[in-house]
């Protein structure tokens, strides 16, 4: 049985699952959001520190669920730090699937997109209204 | 739903030869021939033998028209086949009368029919509907909707930690307010075979009507609605070798007679005026519109096939597979079995693996050709009760082999390797 290069359980993905980037609380979080995928019970919470220039200075996640949902969250946190809210708003589901890299069936794409969906909402969910650079925009 | 009787062992290889899909290889790509399919998702839906497939082809090629309508030869042919199939269902569940067998589109519609028709006509504010913690959503949501419409109150028989109904609670839960008890004969997650006859006896003692969700029992254990003394029994064709899109509701004659129609339309009427209608007699009263004609005929062929094997032999073979799976899984680290020991259940083996999500288990197993179900299996409240979000489920049928059980467990061991190589 040949295991293709775009396999879901490739080394890079398992590494993110087992040694995730920024799993925990964001020390100076300004924005946060949490959501789940009720079909499989995957949960992801994203906490962001967005600075005065609208740039993501810190991105952390917590969660529970399958390898894909949690590895995708880890990859996304690593990817978004340093980028602006404006840039992240433009990040599409297709971009997220490309970032993840492995070939996914439609069902499992939902697992991969959970963190992205939570991130898109987190950017517009200020913990403290005064610090929210994009609070006037409605959530996607 | 009887588990007694000893049957002679099945010739599984001969039976498998009737199922074209069981000989297929999946994941073939280029020069890679792929892997043989190990189909262990039978609680979701079973596969079909050639005999059922051929019966469907025969109808479409030679005998297809609408039923109960035309005054022409073809329509008569189709109607005969459709009604013969009803007779086969009647015999299969030992129903006292033919007109009590109603073709629906599946268990879900059968339960909704009772909840809408019987429920709306009989439930009053404060009345109680008793369900269990292990019900499929199809036997929970229709009652939640009925409760919302009528003001009835839902109560639930709890389960024990090993996944059996806690019968000690029945005297406390059943009372004069209890109007209906809806219980699954076999849990689609735990595999537990519930003491339905006993529950029915106790429910009748307080005057309650009982609906049995037989979706997971009818394919595996003999169903005798008279021996059970049930009031309503619901099941689906596609979980017992039949085509998808057909189900059955059996109901006690006097209950069905007194119930108002469920769906309105053609067939279910005797006479229609511009402002009112007179309903038809049973079973047409509950078969509005063109029924799932060909699926119902295919279900008849499926029943012929099952009767030829015999349900006791089927159950015994599934027990064999179930015991093997339990024994092998006990040797794997980090396995949590859900549900009771094999002797208390049908051929369903649900479990979790420490630190590996059920969807990841299913996906790794799929690479080995092993098809199992992962998720909450339409039983979210049960999973909450078990303290988990999701589980993995292997479910057997008579065409599965001991070798397939071994390959399933070997694939699980590989799954654990995939997720543990960084720790070793």
Image: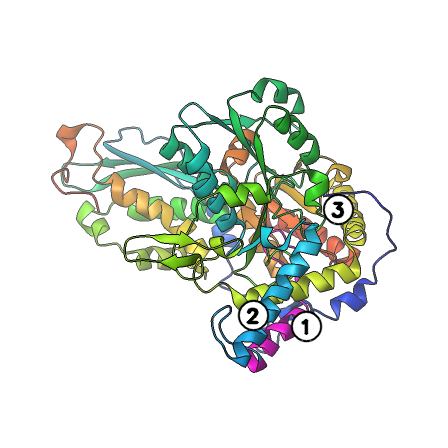
As displayed, is residue B10 above or below residue A15? below
- Left or right? Give the position of B189 relative to B330: left
Residue at 32% over, 59% down: A94
Residue at 26% over, 29% down: A28
- Left or right? Give the position of B78 relative to B400: left
- The question of residue B42 being in magenta is answered with yes
Provide the secondary structure element on which disc 3 rests.
helix
- The question of residue B373 being in magenta is answered with no
- Left or right? Give the position of B287 relative to B253: left
Tag nearer the camera, 2 or 3 = 2
Q: Which residue is mark 1?
A: B50
Taking depth in this image into account, of B11 and B416 the one nearest to the observer is: B11
User: Sequence order check: which comes first, mark 2 or mark 1?
Assistant: 1
The label number, if any, that marks residue B127 in the structure image: none
Residue at 62% over, 22% down: B170
Taking depth in this image into account, of B28 and A71 the one nearest to the observer is: B28
Q: Which residue is mark 2?
A: B79
Provide the secondary structure element on which disc 2 rests.
helix
Q: Quadrant of residue B175?
A: top right
Residue at 23% over, 29% down: A127
Give how far apart the Cα atoms at labels 2 and 1 are: 23 Å
Q: Which residue is mark 3?
A: B322
| Residue A64 can be seen, yes or no | no
Q: Which portion, as a residue range, is magenta?
A: B37-62
Q: Residue B382, position in %: x, y?
A: 54, 34
Provide the secondary structure element on which disc 1 rests.
helix
Give how far apart the Cα atoms at labels 3 and 1 are: 26 Å
Near mark 3 (Cα within 10 A), the count class, few <14, some 14-19 or many ≥20, is many
């Amino acid at each position: 049985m040949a295991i293709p290069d775009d396999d879901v359980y490739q080394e890079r993905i398992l590494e993110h699952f087992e040694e995730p980037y920024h799993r925990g609380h964001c020390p100076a979080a300004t924005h946060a959001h949490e959501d789940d995928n009720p079909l499989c019970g995957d949960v992801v919470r994203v906490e962001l520190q967005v600075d005065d220039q609208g740039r993501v200075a810190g991105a952390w996640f917590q969660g529970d669920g399958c390898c894909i949902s949690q590895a995708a969250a880890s990859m996304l946190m690593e990817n978004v730090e340093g980028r602006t809210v404006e840039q992240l708003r433009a990040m599409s589901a297709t971009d997220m699937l490309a970032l993840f890299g492995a070939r996914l069936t439609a069902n499992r794409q939902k697992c991969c997109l959970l963190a992205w969906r939570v991130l898109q909402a987190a950017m517009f969910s200020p913990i403290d209204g005064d610090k929210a650079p994009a609070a006037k925009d409605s959530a996607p | 739903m009887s588990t007694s009787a000893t049957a002679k062992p099945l010739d599984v290889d001969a039976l498998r030869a009737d199922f074209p899909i069981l000989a297929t290889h999946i994941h073939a790509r280029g020069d890679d021939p792929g892997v043989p399919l190990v189909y262990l998702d039978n609680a979701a839906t079973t596969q079909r033998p050639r005999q059922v497939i051929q019966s469907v082809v025969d109808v479409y090629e030679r005998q297809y028209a609408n039923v109960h309508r035309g005054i022409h030869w073809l329509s008569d042919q189709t109607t005969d086949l459709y009604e013969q199939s009803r007779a086969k269902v009647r015999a299969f569940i030992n129903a006292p009368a033919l007109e009590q067998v109603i073709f629906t589109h599946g268990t879900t519609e059968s339960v909704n029919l009772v909840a809408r028709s019987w429920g709306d006509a009989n439930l009053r504010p404060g009345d109680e509907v008793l369900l269990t913690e292990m019900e499929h959503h199809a036997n929970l949501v229709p009652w939640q909707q009925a409760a919302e419409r009528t003001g009835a109150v839902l109560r639930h028989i709890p389960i024990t930690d090993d996944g059996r109904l806690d019968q000690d609670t029945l005297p406390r839960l059943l009372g004069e307010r209890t109007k209906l008890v809806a219980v699954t004969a076999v849990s689609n997650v735990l595999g537990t075979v519930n003491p339905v006859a006993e529950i029915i006896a106790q429910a009748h003692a307080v005057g309650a009507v009982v609906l049995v969700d037989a979706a997971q029992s009818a394919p595996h254990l003999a169903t005798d609605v008279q021996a059970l003394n049930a009031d309503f029994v619901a099941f689906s064709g596609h979980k017992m070798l039949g085509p998808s899109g057909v189900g059955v509701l059996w109901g006690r004659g006097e209950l069905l007679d007194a119930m108002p129609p469920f769906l309105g339309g053609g067939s279910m009427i005797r006479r229609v005026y511009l402002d009112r209608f007179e309903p038809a007699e049973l079973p047409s009263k509950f078969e509005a519109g063109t029924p799932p004609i060909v699926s119902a005929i295919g279900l008849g062929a499926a029943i012929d096939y099952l009767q030829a094997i015999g349900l006791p032999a089927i159950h015994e073979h599934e027990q064999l597979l179930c015991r093997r799976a339990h024994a092998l899984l006990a040797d794997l680290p980090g396995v949590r079995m859900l549900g009771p020991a094999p002797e208390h259940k049908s051929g369903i083996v649900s479990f979790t693996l420490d630190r590996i999500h059920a969807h990841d288990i299913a996906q790794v197993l799929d690479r080995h050709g092993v098809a199992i179900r992962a998720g909450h299996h339409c039983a979210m409240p049960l999973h909450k009760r078990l303290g988990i979000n999701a589980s993995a489920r292997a479910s057997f049928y008579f065409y599965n082999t001991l070798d397939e059980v071994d390959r399933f467990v070997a694939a699980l061991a590989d799954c654990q390797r995939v997720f543990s190589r960084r720790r070793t």
